[in-house]
Amino acid sequence: MATPVWLSIPFAGLLLCIALFPIMKADWWEEHKALVVAFWSVLTLILFTMVFGPAASLETAVDCLFNDYVTFIVLLFGLYCVSGNITFTGDLAGSPAVNVGLLAIGTLLSSCIGTTGSSMLMIRPVIRMNSWRRRRAHIMIFFIFLISNIGGCLTPVGDPPLLMGFMHGVSFFWSLHLFPVMLLNMAVLLFIFYHIDMKEYRADVADGRKPDISKPGTELKIGGGHNIIFLIAIVAAVVLSGTLSNYPMFQNADGSAAGVPLPGGKVFPWASVIEIVIILISALLSFVTTNREVRRKNHFTWGAIEEVATLFIGIFITMQPALLLLKEVGPQLGLNHPAQMFWATGILSSFLDNTPTYLVFLTTAGTLDFTQGMMTTLGIVPANMLMAISCGAVFMGAITYIGNAPNFMVKSMSDENGIAMPSFFGYLKWSVKYLVPVFLLDTVIFFL
């Protein structure tokens, strides 16, 4: 049975609430956001049951909660905990040159420990080094553009869509083909950022603000540095989960994933169970082995992770009909050119989970009967087509706050630290002004 378009109304309703209520009813939203999320989530399940029946609704809900949301939030929780136990202190002050350097380092780091890991590791140093400044929102916006999204394109570790490609036959180091695209985007965005930051920096200095340092740029200390081991362990757990599922001992006789039986006929794969256990143990050991003074210096609280956990459970549930609709219509969209794949994958990844969106269009490309390119389990996909799908899924997650997991976390942590981040539509205005022209440049140079 085809999925009716109107089943996506709760998803649109939740997105509008996330976008509008913080502007129109900020205090009310802070107090009642959980009820709003619950309303749209329950409405989705009721409408889904009316169309597909109770069994299908239960199966979809259980699969979404365990195989999507639980693995997502546990990973985010683990990285949030471990990164909160690492502190950078010293005499570096947030000048335009220093900020460009921090963003560049974080962007390159994202392909090594993932966009979420790099975002959680770098956000506190960036906030702290710029704490003397009043005009800081633009720093965090470009932080999301570069570290939370674009930087994750070089390895399957960098972003979940590329890990999904690796699990379907794309070689581990193939993503290095995307380096020229990432380098161009880094260069253009950092150039733009430098000039914006210089203007705001001079305005802050003109207001009489200056960093409280005695020996500028001479000292940088790391506290809780041993937590890097736990950070690496979490990244390794994600990669391990993606590879274990391909081994026969983690599969049933029919090739499906073996795991813990769930209501509705689904299973929670053993590979995911192992991943979660490693992440939670790493988070626990991080807290046990780190002096709480480190967390105090980081102003560590649970507010940001609580907000993300609350909002994203609703997003994951309400977007299920939209994902089903995409899977049904994807192959009929007539997309057979890299530029089309780049924008179709990217625009949908801005609002939907970029991992299933990537898989839908990779599957679509694999059915187009190409005879040359990357041999995947879904068919042969030409290199330029695979580049377009990969870049679209990874890069354009930066267009909205909900486009990629770390985006909203960075916003929440910035708000928590006194940085007045723009609203949903305010941020969208920034991305349309600065990101979309860069993506058009990508299209002309790499995908036409």
Image: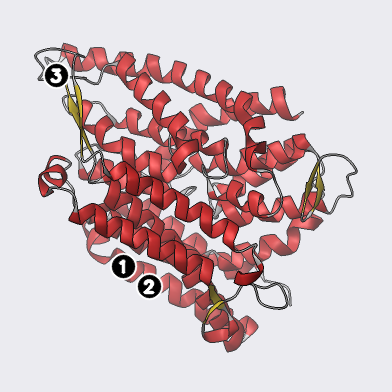
Taking the image as shown, residue 209 lies to the left or right of residue 164, namely left
Q: Classify residue 7 by image quadrant.
A: bottom right
Q: Which mark is residue 211?
A: 3
User: How many residues crowd around disc 1 within 10 Å: few (fewer than 14), some, or many (20 or more)?
Assistant: some
The disc label shown at residue 38, or none: 2
Question: Is 220 left, or right, of 181 in this rendering?
Answer: left
| Disc with the residue nearer the chain's start (3 vs 2) | 2
Q: The residue under label 1 is which amino acid type?
A: Ala
* Residue at mark 3 to residue at mark 2: CA–CA distance: 44 Å
Residue 155 vertical position relative to residue 440 in the rendered view, above or below: below
Identity, as a three-letter code, of the amino acid under mark 3: Pro
The quarter of the picture where the C terminus appears is top right
Look at 42% across and 24% down and name the residue there: 104
Q: Characterize the local packing of mark 3: few (<14), some (14-19) or many (20 or more) Cα atoms within 10 angstroms.
A: some
Q: Secondary structure at mark 3?
A: loop
Q: Are marks 2 and 1 in contact (CB under 8 Å)?
A: yes
Q: Toward the viewer: 251 or 7?
A: 251
The residue mark sitting in front, 3 or 2, is 3
Q: CA distance from mark 3 to mark 1?
A: 39 Å
Q: Residue at x 37, y 18 (%)?
A: 196
- Tell me: 40 left or right of 386: left
Q: Position of residue 23 (x, y in %)?
A: 31, 49
Front-most of residues 200 and 112: 112
- Secondary structure beneath label 2: helix
36 or 296: nearer the viewer: 296
Q: Amino acid at mark 2?
A: Ala
Residue 240 x %, y %: 52, 56
> SS for tag 1?
helix
Residue under pointer 1? 34
Q: Does residue 196 appear left or right of residue 300 in this picture?
A: right
